[in-house]
Amino acid sequence: MNKPITFETGVKKLVILLGLLIASPIILSLAFKAIRIFKEAPKIYIAYGLLVIGIILLLFTVYFGFKTFKTLLDFLFKNNL
């Protein structure tokens, strides 16, 4: 059975989303700076790995944002049938 949607779950998701909205652009900018600075073999692999992690995190942030706002809207406009 589905868990009831409460305001607390929506706020918790919103706080996590805020952290993701701060962390994902910072990781992406660090990755681009690392790619520009590092040119030798071991460090450039780390820079590209950081870039892949940042892109995945950015895509997850967009997905999680839609899910978070859907949770909040479901709580606000739920039917009490």
Image: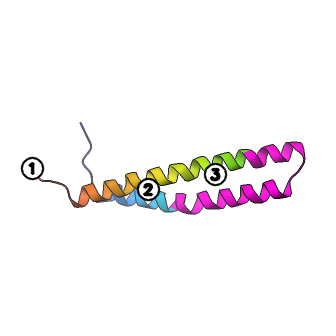
> Percent from the top left, x then y, of residue 53?
64, 47
Question: What residue span does the magenta drawing correspond to?
Answer: 19-48
Query: What amino acid type is highlighted by mark number 2?
Result: Gly
Query: What amino acid type is highlighted by mark number 1?
Result: Leu
- Comparing 1 with 40, the one in front is 40
> Percent from the top left, x then y, of residue 51?
69, 50
- What count of labels does the image hold? 3
The residue positioned 24% from the left and 48% from the top of the image is: 4
Number of residues whose C-alpha sits closer than 10 Å to that of mark 3, classed few (under 14), some (14–19) or many (20 or more): many
- Comparing 13 with 50, the one in front is 50
Q: Which residue is mark 3?
A: 54
Within the magenta stretch, is there residue 22?
A: yes
Q: Which residue is mark 2?
A: 65
- Comparing 24 with 55, the one in front is 55
Which residue appears farthest toward the left when viewing the image? Answer: 81
Report helix, strand or loop for mark 1. Answer: loop
Left or right, 81 with reference to 13: left
Above-or-below relation of 29 to 51:
below
Real-space CA distance between mark 2 and mark 3, rounded to the nearest whole angstrom: 16 Å
Report helix, strand or loop for mark 3. Answer: helix
Above-or-below relation of 40 to 8:
above
Left or right, 70 with reference to 61: left
N-terminal-most mark, 3 or 1: 3
Q: Based on the displayed image, in which of its 4 quarters is residue 45 positioned? A: top right
Real-space CA distance between mark 1 and mark 2, rounded to the nearest whole angstrom: 28 Å
Identify the mark at residue 12; answer none if there is no mark: none
Q: Which residue is mark 1?
A: 81
Query: Which quarter shows the N terminus?
Result: top left
